[in-house]
Amino acid sequence: MAEEPEDGKEEAEAEEGAESEGGSDEEVVEKKGRFSFTRKQLLMFGVPALLLLGGGGYFGATQFDLMGASQTAESPVGAKVYYDLPEMVVNLSSGDKRVQYLKLKVALEASDQMVVKSLAPVMPRVLDMFQLYLRELRSSDLEGSAGIFRLKEELLRRINLEIHPNHVDRVLFKEIIVQ
């Protein structure tokens, strides 16, 4: 039993010697130089930095199509079909006596010829819906790029409702004049 305290003393002395020789983790950082890090610092800063860089790289690759993932056999590049709608001229809704007109030339972009073929039978209804919607607009609704974007989205929504199993990808404005 007398030997146990001596072993405990030797272990305690060895630990004190190790601390005096190597020091704690912070002391090691000071002795090694300014670019040394403790394990705790590496975990706190290194892991989140790696995750951030990896996530940013993945986002950039998917958004800018660096891996070529969006090109499929079904929709090769340049296979879009365009359909020009007849020119439309409507008077806009206004609260005063002043009459304002909207002249609009629109083209539709579709992914294949079948969508364009499905437009022909319903074109009178599509034009009627467009005319009714456009007549309710005010000139203030068409101000700025946000107003034109809303108009584009609303026209796209209305045409896709009419040709439901098929769908038009985009509404393209060829000419917009508010007078």
Image (tube, grey):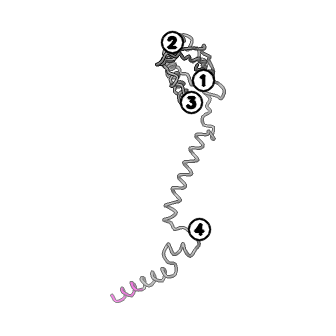
Q: Is mark 4 on a helix, strand or loop?
A: loop
Circle count:
4
Can residue 176 be seen in the rendering of this structure? Answer: yes
- According to the picture, the residue beneath numbered tag 4 turns out to be 35
**Which secondary structure, mark 3?**
helix
User: How far apart in space, not on screen, are marks 1 and 3 (Cα)?
Assistant: 14 Å
Question: How far from the left and from the top, in percent, is residue 142?
Answer: 53, 25
For the C terminus, the image quarter is: top right
Residue at 57 percent across and 14 percent down: it is 89
Query: Which residue occupies the extreme bottom position in the image?
Result: 2
| Amino acid at dot 4 | Phe
Front label number (3 vs 2): 3
**Label 3 sits on what residue type?**
Ser
Relative to 154, 117 lies left or right: right
User: CA gap, disc 2 to disc 1?
Assistant: 19 Å
First reached walking from the N terminus: tag 4 or tag 2: 4
Across and down, in percent, residue 49 comes to 54, 55
Which label is found at residue 172? 1
Which residue type carries mark 2? Answer: Asp
**Quarter assignment of residue 10:** bottom left
Q: Residue at x 44, y 85 (%)?
A: 13
Q: Which of marks 1 and 3 is in front?
A: 3
Residue 145: assigned label: 3
Q: Which residue is drawn at 57% across and 11% down?
A: 120
Q: As drawn, is 12 to the left or to the right of 49?
A: left
Q: What stretch is highlighted in magenta?
A: 1-9
Disc 2 marks which residue? 128
* Prevailing secondary structure of the magenta residues: helix
**How much space separates mark 1 and mark 4, taking CA atoms?**
57 Å
Q: Which is closer to the viewer, label 1 or label 4?
A: 1
Whole-percent x and y of residue 1? 33, 87
